[in-house]
Image (cartoon, helix red, strand yellow):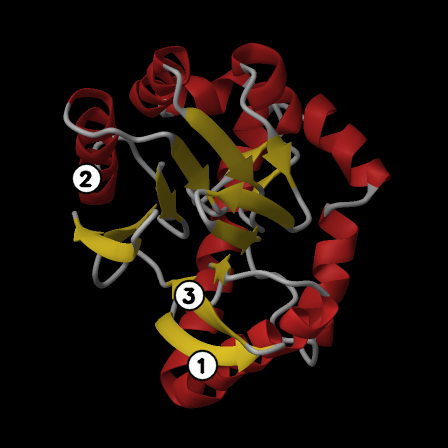
Amino acid sequence: MQAWFVSDIHLRDINERNSVRLLRFLHFLLKDSEATHLFLLGDIFDLWVGDSDLFQRKFQAIVDALAELKKKGVEVIYFEGNHDVHVKRFWEEKFSIPVFVEHKVYHLGPFQVRLEHGDYINPKDIKYLKYLELIRSKKMEKVAHVVPGKFWDQVGSWSARKSRKRSSGQRQNNEQNLREMIRLYAQDKSQEQSFDYIITGHMHIRDEFAFEAAGKKVMSINLGSWFDEPKALCLTESGHSWREL
Protein backbone atom coordinates (compact mmCIF):
# COMPACT_ATOMS: atom_id res chain seq x y z
CA MET A 1 0.00 0.00 0.00
CA GLN A 2 1.28 3.42 -0.97
CA ALA A 3 -1.27 6.21 -0.60
CA TRP A 4 -0.65 9.83 -1.56
CA PHE A 5 -2.48 12.95 -0.41
CA VAL A 6 -2.55 16.52 -1.74
CA SER A 7 -4.85 19.50 -1.21
CA ASP A 8 -5.12 23.27 -1.54
CA ILE A 9 -3.05 23.73 -4.67
CA HIS A 10 -5.46 26.39 -6.02
CA LEU A 11 -4.48 26.13 -9.66
CA ARG A 12 -5.60 29.02 -11.85
CA ASP A 13 -3.76 28.27 -15.06
CA ILE A 14 -2.23 25.17 -16.65
CA ASN A 15 1.05 26.99 -17.26
CA GLU A 16 1.67 28.24 -13.74
CA ARG A 17 4.50 26.80 -11.65
CA ASN A 18 2.32 24.66 -9.40
CA SER A 19 0.50 23.16 -12.40
CA VAL A 20 3.89 22.08 -13.72
CA ARG A 21 4.75 20.67 -10.29
CA LEU A 22 1.48 18.77 -10.09
CA LEU A 23 1.93 17.30 -13.57
CA ARG A 24 5.48 16.26 -12.70
CA PHE A 25 4.18 14.61 -9.52
CA LEU A 26 1.39 12.78 -11.38
CA HIS A 27 3.89 11.52 -13.96
CA PHE A 28 6.12 10.34 -11.10
CA LEU A 29 3.16 8.36 -9.72
CA LEU A 30 2.55 6.90 -13.18
CA LYS A 31 6.13 5.93 -14.04
CA ASP A 32 8.30 5.74 -10.94
CA SER A 33 6.18 4.84 -7.94
CA GLU A 34 4.19 1.94 -6.54
CA ALA A 35 1.19 4.15 -5.77
CA THR A 36 -2.05 2.38 -4.88
CA HIS A 37 -4.13 5.44 -3.94
CA LEU A 38 -4.21 9.16 -4.70
CA PHE A 39 -6.48 11.29 -2.52
CA LEU A 40 -7.25 14.82 -3.70
CA LEU A 41 -8.54 16.59 -0.59
CA GLY A 42 -10.10 19.64 -2.19
CA ASP A 43 -9.22 23.04 -3.64
CA ILE A 44 -6.94 21.43 -6.19
CA PHE A 45 -8.19 24.11 -8.57
CA ASP A 46 -8.75 27.71 -7.59
CA LEU A 47 -12.09 27.46 -9.35
CA TRP A 48 -14.00 24.54 -10.81
CA VAL A 49 -17.79 24.63 -10.74
CA GLY A 50 -20.01 21.89 -12.16
CA ASP A 51 -19.23 19.79 -15.20
CA SER A 52 -18.56 22.49 -17.80
CA ASP A 53 -16.15 21.48 -20.56
CA LEU A 54 -14.44 24.84 -20.09
CA PHE A 55 -12.67 23.64 -16.95
CA GLN A 56 -11.69 20.36 -18.55
CA ARG A 57 -10.13 22.19 -21.50
CA LYS A 58 -8.43 24.66 -19.18
CA PHE A 59 -6.71 21.86 -17.23
CA GLN A 60 -6.71 19.13 -19.89
CA ALA A 61 -3.19 17.87 -19.17
CA ILE A 62 -4.02 17.34 -15.48
CA VAL A 63 -7.34 15.66 -16.30
CA ASP A 64 -5.53 13.35 -18.73
CA ALA A 65 -2.87 12.45 -16.16
CA LEU A 66 -5.50 11.60 -13.53
CA ALA A 67 -7.37 9.49 -16.08
CA GLU A 68 -4.13 7.62 -16.87
CA LEU A 69 -3.54 6.94 -13.18
CA LYS A 70 -7.04 5.53 -12.94
CA LYS A 71 -6.42 3.29 -15.96
CA LYS A 72 -3.17 2.10 -14.39
CA GLY A 73 -5.16 0.82 -11.42
CA VAL A 74 -4.44 3.59 -8.92
CA GLU A 75 -7.49 4.42 -6.82
CA VAL A 76 -8.05 8.15 -7.37
CA ILE A 77 -10.51 9.73 -4.93
CA TYR A 78 -11.64 13.36 -4.97
CA PHE A 79 -12.97 15.32 -1.99
CA GLU A 80 -14.64 18.60 -2.87
CA GLY A 81 -13.28 21.77 -1.31
CA ASN A 82 -14.84 25.21 -1.31
CA HIS A 83 -13.23 26.24 -4.60
CA ASP A 84 -14.07 23.06 -6.54
CA VAL A 85 -17.79 22.41 -6.06
CA HIS A 86 -20.44 20.18 -7.65
CA VAL A 87 -17.77 18.29 -9.60
CA LYS A 88 -19.19 14.85 -8.82
CA ARG A 89 -20.96 14.48 -12.17
CA PHE A 90 -17.81 15.38 -14.10
CA TRP A 91 -15.32 13.07 -12.37
CA GLU A 92 -17.63 10.14 -11.68
CA GLU A 93 -19.50 9.96 -15.00
CA LYS A 94 -16.52 10.66 -17.26
CA PHE A 95 -13.69 8.95 -15.39
CA SER A 96 -15.25 6.79 -12.64
CA ILE A 97 -13.35 8.80 -10.03
CA PRO A 98 -15.48 8.91 -6.85
CA VAL A 99 -16.18 12.33 -5.35
CA PHE A 100 -17.14 13.02 -1.74
CA VAL A 101 -18.24 16.14 0.09
CA GLU A 102 -18.32 14.83 3.66
CA HIS A 103 -15.59 12.93 5.49
CA LYS A 104 -14.81 9.29 4.79
CA VAL A 105 -12.79 6.69 6.71
CA TYR A 106 -10.54 4.41 4.66
CA HIS A 107 -8.74 1.26 5.73
CA LEU A 108 -5.23 1.76 4.31
CA GLY A 109 -2.78 -0.99 5.21
CA PRO A 110 -2.78 -1.29 9.01
CA PHE A 111 -4.36 2.16 9.47
CA GLN A 112 -7.87 3.55 9.75
CA VAL A 113 -7.64 6.98 8.10
CA ARG A 114 -10.27 9.71 8.33
CA LEU A 115 -10.16 12.05 5.33
CA GLU A 116 -11.92 15.35 4.60
CA HIS A 117 -11.28 18.79 3.17
CA GLY A 118 -11.56 20.42 6.59
CA ASP A 119 -14.49 22.80 6.13
CA TYR A 120 -15.74 22.34 9.68
CA ILE A 121 -12.49 22.76 11.58
CA ASN A 122 -13.47 26.29 12.67
CA PRO A 123 -17.03 26.07 14.05
CA LYS A 124 -17.00 29.77 14.99
CA ASP A 125 -16.70 30.96 11.39
CA ILE A 126 -20.46 31.34 10.98
CA LYS A 127 -20.21 33.38 7.76
CA TYR A 128 -18.17 30.67 6.09
CA LEU A 129 -20.49 27.89 7.28
CA LYS A 130 -23.50 29.76 5.88
CA TYR A 131 -21.63 30.30 2.61
CA LEU A 132 -20.83 26.59 2.52
CA GLU A 133 -24.46 25.68 3.13
CA LEU A 134 -25.47 27.93 0.23
CA ILE A 135 -22.96 26.73 -2.36
CA ARG A 136 -23.60 23.07 -1.54
CA SER A 137 -27.39 23.34 -1.62
CA LYS A 138 -29.46 21.38 -4.15
CA LYS A 139 -30.61 24.64 -5.72
CA MET A 140 -27.03 25.80 -6.25
CA GLU A 141 -26.12 22.39 -7.65
CA LYS A 142 -28.75 22.83 -10.37
CA VAL A 143 -27.47 26.34 -11.10
CA ALA A 144 -23.88 25.07 -11.27
CA HIS A 145 -24.72 22.69 -14.11
CA VAL A 146 -26.87 25.17 -16.07
CA VAL A 147 -24.85 28.40 -15.96
CA PRO A 148 -22.06 28.45 -18.61
CA GLY A 149 -18.55 27.73 -17.40
CA LYS A 150 -17.34 31.07 -18.77
CA PHE A 151 -19.52 32.87 -16.24
CA TRP A 152 -18.10 30.87 -13.33
CA ASP A 153 -14.58 31.36 -14.67
CA GLN A 154 -14.95 35.15 -14.63
CA VAL A 155 -17.14 35.84 -11.59
CA GLY A 156 -15.94 32.91 -9.51
CA SER A 157 -12.24 33.65 -10.02
CA TRP A 158 -12.76 37.13 -8.64
CA SER A 159 -14.60 35.72 -5.63
CA ALA A 160 -11.95 33.05 -5.03
CA ARG A 161 -9.11 35.58 -5.10
CA LYS A 162 -10.95 37.81 -2.67
CA SER A 163 -11.64 34.88 -0.36
CA ARG A 164 -8.00 33.75 -0.41
CA LYS A 165 -6.71 37.24 0.29
CA ARG A 166 -9.04 37.52 3.28
CA SER A 167 -8.17 34.07 4.66
CA SER A 168 -4.46 34.64 4.04
CA GLY A 169 -4.54 37.73 6.24
CA GLN A 170 -6.40 35.81 8.90
CA ARG A 171 -3.79 33.04 8.85
CA GLN A 172 -0.91 35.46 9.24
CA ASN A 173 -2.54 37.10 12.25
CA ASN A 174 -3.91 33.96 13.91
CA GLU A 175 -1.73 31.07 12.80
CA GLN A 176 -1.29 29.61 16.26
CA ASN A 177 -5.02 29.84 16.97
CA LEU A 178 -5.80 28.10 13.69
CA ARG A 179 -3.24 25.40 14.44
CA GLU A 180 -4.96 24.80 17.76
CA MET A 181 -8.30 24.55 15.95
CA ILE A 182 -6.92 21.81 13.70
CA ARG A 183 -5.68 19.85 16.70
CA LEU A 184 -8.83 20.31 18.79
CA TYR A 185 -10.96 19.24 15.83
CA ALA A 186 -8.90 16.06 15.48
CA GLN A 187 -9.23 15.30 19.17
CA ASP A 188 -12.99 15.92 19.11
CA LYS A 189 -13.51 13.63 16.11
CA SER A 190 -11.44 10.90 17.74
CA GLN A 191 -14.10 10.77 20.45
CA GLU A 192 -16.78 10.08 17.83
CA GLN A 193 -15.04 7.25 15.96
CA SER A 194 -11.81 5.31 16.09
CA PHE A 195 -9.03 6.06 13.60
CA ASP A 196 -5.24 6.13 13.47
CA TYR A 197 -4.89 9.17 11.20
CA ILE A 198 -7.02 12.20 10.46
CA ILE A 199 -5.85 14.04 7.35
CA THR A 200 -7.32 17.44 6.46
CA GLY A 201 -6.67 20.49 4.31
CA HIS A 202 -8.41 23.87 3.97
CA MET A 203 -6.53 25.73 6.70
CA HIS A 204 -3.32 26.25 4.65
CA ILE A 205 -1.21 25.45 7.71
CA ARG A 206 0.91 22.30 7.44
CA ASP A 207 0.74 20.61 10.81
CA GLU A 208 1.47 17.26 12.44
CA PHE A 209 0.13 16.50 15.88
CA ALA A 210 0.25 13.19 17.75
CA PHE A 211 -2.09 12.50 20.65
CA GLU A 212 -3.72 9.60 22.46
CA ALA A 213 -7.37 8.58 22.17
CA ALA A 214 -8.91 5.51 23.78
CA GLY A 215 -5.45 4.29 24.72
CA LYS A 216 -3.88 4.44 21.26
CA LYS A 217 -1.75 6.90 19.34
CA VAL A 218 -3.55 9.07 16.79
CA MET A 219 -1.88 11.35 14.25
CA SER A 220 -3.50 14.54 12.97
CA ILE A 221 -2.04 15.92 9.73
CA ASN A 222 -3.06 19.07 7.90
CA LEU A 223 -1.65 19.16 4.38
CA GLY A 224 -1.05 22.91 4.32
CA SER A 225 -1.05 24.56 0.90
CA TRP A 226 1.20 24.81 -2.13
CA PHE A 227 1.55 28.59 -1.91
CA ASP A 228 4.74 28.50 0.14
CA GLU A 229 6.08 24.94 0.19
CA PRO A 230 4.56 22.39 -2.22
CA LYS A 231 4.58 18.92 -0.67
CA ALA A 232 2.67 15.65 -0.98
CA LEU A 233 2.02 13.28 1.90
CA CYS A 234 2.77 9.58 1.48
CA LEU A 235 1.40 6.83 3.72
CA THR A 236 2.71 3.26 3.67
CA GLU A 237 2.47 0.32 6.07
CA SER A 238 5.43 1.75 8.00
CA GLY A 239 3.97 5.23 8.48
CA HIS A 240 3.92 8.62 6.77
CA SER A 241 6.47 10.86 5.07
CA TRP A 242 6.54 14.00 2.92
CA ARG A 243 7.76 14.47 -0.64
CA GLU A 244 8.93 17.92 -1.71
CA LEU A 245 7.69 18.86 -5.16
Residue at image coords 54%, 23%: 97
User: Which element carries disc 3, helix, strand or loop?
Assistant: strand
Q: Earlier in the sequence, mark 2 or mark 1?
A: 2
Q: Earlier in the sequence, mark 2 or mark 3?
A: 2
**Distance from label 3 to label 1 (Cα)?**
11 Å
- In the rendering, at what x and y percent does residue 165 appear? 42, 67
Query: Which is more toward the observer, 3 or 243?
Result: 3
Eye-nearest disc, 3 or 1: 3
- In the rendering, at what x and y percent does residue 164 appear? 45, 62
Q: Residues within 10 Å of mark 1 (few under 14, many from 20)?
A: many
Q: What residue is disc 3 on?
A: 221
Mark 2 and 1 residues: CB-CB less than 8 Å, in contact?
no
Residue at image coords 25%, 56%: 241
Q: Residues within 10 Å of mark 3 (few under 14, many from 20)?
A: many
Eye-nearest disc, 2 or 3: 3
Residue at image coords 57%, 35%: 152
Q: What residue is disc 1 on?
A: 179
**Distance from label 2 to label 3 (Cα)?**
22 Å
Mark 3 and 1 residues: CB-CB less than 8 Å, in contact?
no
**Distance from label 2 to label 1 (Cα)?**
26 Å
Residue flagged by tag 2: what amino acid is it? Arg
**Quadrant that contains the N terminus:** top left
Quarter of the image for residue 61 reads top left
Q: Is residue 212 above or below residue 240?
A: below
Eye-nearest disc, 2 or 1: 1
Q: What residue is disc 2 on?
A: 21
